[in-house]
Image (spheres, grey):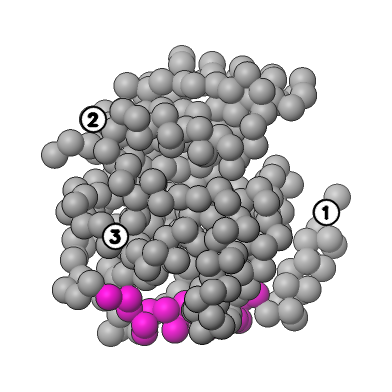
Amino acid sequence: MKYAPIAIFAYNRLNEIKLVIESLKKNKFIDKSKIYVFLDGPKNDYDRKKNEQIKFFLNYKSNLKNAKILQNKKNLGLKKNINKGLNYIFKKYEKSIIIEDDILVSPNFLEVMNFYLTYYSNNSRVCSIEGYMYPIEFKDEINEVFLLKGTGGWGWGTWRRAWKNYSNNRNKLISKLENMGSNAINDFNYKNSYNYFKILKENKNSWAINWYASNFIKKKYTVFFKNSLVKNIGFGNSATHTIIDYKLNVKKFKKKHKIFVPKNMEENNNAKKQISLFLKKKFNTFNKLKLKLKYLLNVK
């Protein structure tokens, strides 16, 4: 098996990237994987100091083999850094595993991701493999692995052929979705449980919503897992985008993920319904206000 290179996108969070690297090192295929760290440039002296500390850790303390650091001279922001980094990767490789500096991975994350990246490598209907899943207690009839339209973005893998679908043109994506009609927008919003379409219209700095829309419009599928392969440790005051922790992580990683291939190339509507119910409950107005108030009361 040709192991997919790992692209890590980092900025100024030394403590978080140390934990991410330690979680990767628990994977038995880590020494067989090329690692590229795309370190965004500093905005100020604080960032510059953190950049140097991260480079020192990666070069001299991490004990990573086959690791290469590519640093931007200026601060591009995550969206541009992702674009630049993946364009660099896909000039060299056919596939890649992508994580950010706040994504912890399970001990068999690389094994699972590499299997599905190999299995679906020539299937143009599949655009990505997503490591993250909400902490949902799915009903028993939901398989360990299933397909959904669109994508995710917390610990994922894709191919050069699929990344070509990515569009930075938000207005074009919005127009195409609108032309698909209200039913499609309702589906894009996970049965109106979470307003992804509003995010697409308002958030100019999100690469992830563009990636989702680009593939949803083309009716491409992502492979999702019933039990999450990753955890996001990036919530809190050090976060660039999400300060409030909505408790979106699994408590424990599953010890071993079974390799299972869906028999039919179609979306799992039952899984999507259960995800929609979770999103409605988690992000209703009352719950958001409660969590925001709790956060404000605990800020020192």
Marks 2/1: CA distance? 43 Å
CB of mark 2 within 8 Å of CB of mark 1? no
Residue 252 in the image, given as x and y percentages of width and height:
42, 60
State the residue position of label 2.
Answer: 32
Q: Give the residues drawn in magenta, as a range.
A: 266-283
Q: Few, some or many C-alpha atoms within 10 Å of disc 3 (few <14, some 14-19, many ≥20)?
A: many
Residue 117 in the image, given as x and y percentages of width and height:
25, 49
Q: In which quarter of the image is residue 288?
A: bottom right
Q: Which of the two discs, 2 and 1, labels the residue nearer the N terminus? A: 2
Marks 3/1: CA distance? 43 Å
The kind of residue on which mark 2 rests is Lys
| Picture layout, residue 267 above or below residue 218 | below
Mark nearest the camera among 3 and 1 is 3
Q: Closer to the camera, 269 or 54?
A: 269
Q: Residue at x 78, y 61 (%)?
A: 295
Q: Which residue is drawn at 37% across and 68% down?
A: 219
Residue 177 in sight from this viewpoint: yes
Asked whether 50 falls inside the magenta stretch, the response is: no
Q: Few, some or many C-alpha atoms within 10 Å of disc 1 (few <14, some 14-19, many ≥20)?
A: few
The kind of residue on which mark 3 rests is Val
Mark nearest the camera among 2 and 1 is 2
Numbered circle sitting on residue 126? 3
Q: Few, some or many C-alpha atoms within 10 Å of disc 2 (few <14, some 14-19, many ≥20)?
A: few
- Image check: 188 left or right of 241? left
Numbered circle sitting on residue 299? 1
Residue 165 in the image, given as x and y percentages of width and height:
41, 51
Helix, strand or loop status at disc 2:
helix
Residue 15 in sight from this viewpoint: no
